[in-house]
Every structure is written in C-alpha cells, then in structure tokens.
Amino acid sequence: MSPVEVSPDATTLARTVATALVEHVASVQAEGRVPAIALTGGTIALEVYRAVPEAGSDAVDWTQVDFWWGDERYVAADSGDRNDRAAGLAMLDALGVDPARVHAMPAADEFHDDVAAAAAAYTEELRAHGSGPFDLVLLGLGPDGHVASLFPGFAQLDVDDVAALPVTDSPKPPPERITLTFGALNQTHEVWFLVSGQDKADAVARALADEGSVRETPARGIVCDRITWYVDQAAAASL
C-alpha cells in the first residue's frame, strides 16, 4: 500500500503539505531542473496553497517553476469556479510566479469553439512542452472516488492516448470540464493525494484496498513509482 501520512486535522494537513511542497520544488531546482507541477482544485488544496507562502517559500525560485492543472471547470476565466483563479489568488500571485510558466487550461470565453476544442488545445500545449513527465501531480479525491474530472463509469477512464479530454456531463457542477487522462497524470515522478473530511473516508479506503475496480473508484487508476496519501484523521477513519 502507498504511504499514508495522517494529520490530526485539515489545518495541520495543509501546513504539512505546504512545507513538503516547498521542499520538493527546492530539491528539483537543486538538481538544475525546472520543476513541473500539476495542481488540483478543491477545498483542502486551496488551504495548502494559502499555506505555501508561509512555509519557507523563499527557498525556491518561483519564477523557474512550471505549473499545470489536472482538471478545470470550463467556465469564464474570471469565474470563481476556476481552479486556476483560486490558486492564483491563494498562492501564485503571492509567490511572484512567472505568468508565462502558468499553463492554465482554456476558459470558456477564449478562442475555442467548444470544450472539446479547448481540451485538444491543452493536449497540444502539453505536447509542445514535451508532454511530461511532471515532477509532481497533486490530486484531490471525491466521495465517489473520482480524481481530476475522471468520474466513476465515465468513458474518459478508458482513454489514455491523448493528454486531455472534454467532460460534458459532470455529475458535479459545472457540467463542462477539461481533464487530464490517466495517460497524462501517470507521466509523473510522484503523486500526492490530498484528502480531508469524513465524507471521503470510504473513498480513501476503496482507493487503497487490495482489490477494487478503477471504473468504480477512478483513484485506483493512478499508478506511478511514488504515491503518497496526505489525509486528516477524518478521511483516514475507514483505513
């Protein structure tokens, strides 16, 4: 089973991950490389982002970090539903990240005919930058076991020959989204799951069980050499 780091509460979890993130990025830069980090949305991720500027962030040259997204809501660029807008307000702006290194997924008010064209454009952007591997992918987990916008039973679970796909009928609003596929998410050196709350406990247990289906619990489709689960006690309750 992948390592599970349990924090007593969500606040401690956020601070723990923020510190680990700064250390991880600094270690990649110490190797002479530009880190490539795929960010996630969600409540606990936002708390992590808010904690990063206070977590020794001056150890990192934030102008030399590439940021990507695992999924995004296909809404207007200034919508409060956007993962990139929340991350920008909480972390990227405060750290002075180079805007040219922030690879946001296309917004609904940009120059694409529809969400399918927008997803294809993100696939091309990833390809133009070498299509990975990422140094680190951050992922949340839904109560249904979904990761990014890969939902139980959805056709997107079976596609791994392109990097990004459209979602038009998300069970969580808004219905239109762009998501990286397993093929893209698994092109990484390391994955961290960030999970908080009692409502996620069953999904955490199913994701980490010895047996189970990816179609029922998409988190089981994440496979790489190093996966760490950062959870609070409530989310770990069923382990």
Image: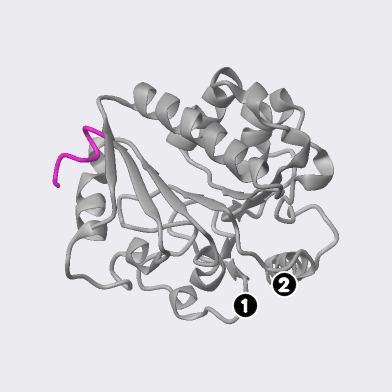
Tell me the magenta residue range: 232-239
- Secondary structure, mark 1, is loop
Q: Tag 2 or tag 1, which sits nearer the N-term?
A: 2
Q: CA distance from mark 1 to mark 2?
A: 9 Å
**Residue on which the image places disc 2:** 120
Note whether 233 is above or below 53 in the view shown: below
Amino acid on which disc 2 is placed: Ala
Number of numbered discs visible in the structure rendering: 2
Q: State the mark number for residue 162.
A: 1
Q: How far across and how far down the image is residue 130, in percent?
A: 73, 68
Q: Residues within 10 Å of mark 2 (few under 14, many from 20)?
A: some
Q: Nearer the viewer, residue 188 or 167?
A: 188
The magenta stretch spans residue 237: yes
Q: Are marks 1 and 2 in contact (CB under 8 Å)?
A: yes
Q: Residue at x 28, y 49 (%)?
A: 3
Judged from this view, the residue extending furthest toward the front is 31
Q: Residue at x 74, y 52 (%)?
A: 107
Judged from this view, the residue extending furthest toward the top is 54
Q: Residue at x 82, y 55 (%)?
A: 110
Amino acid on which disc 1 is placed: Val
- Colour convention: one colour
Q: Does the rendering let one see residue 43? A: no
Q: How far across and how far down the image is residue 28, in percent?
A: 61, 45
Q: Does the rendering let one see residue 27? A: yes
Determine which quarter of the picture holds residue 158. bottom left
Q: Residue at x 49, y 30 (%)?
A: 18
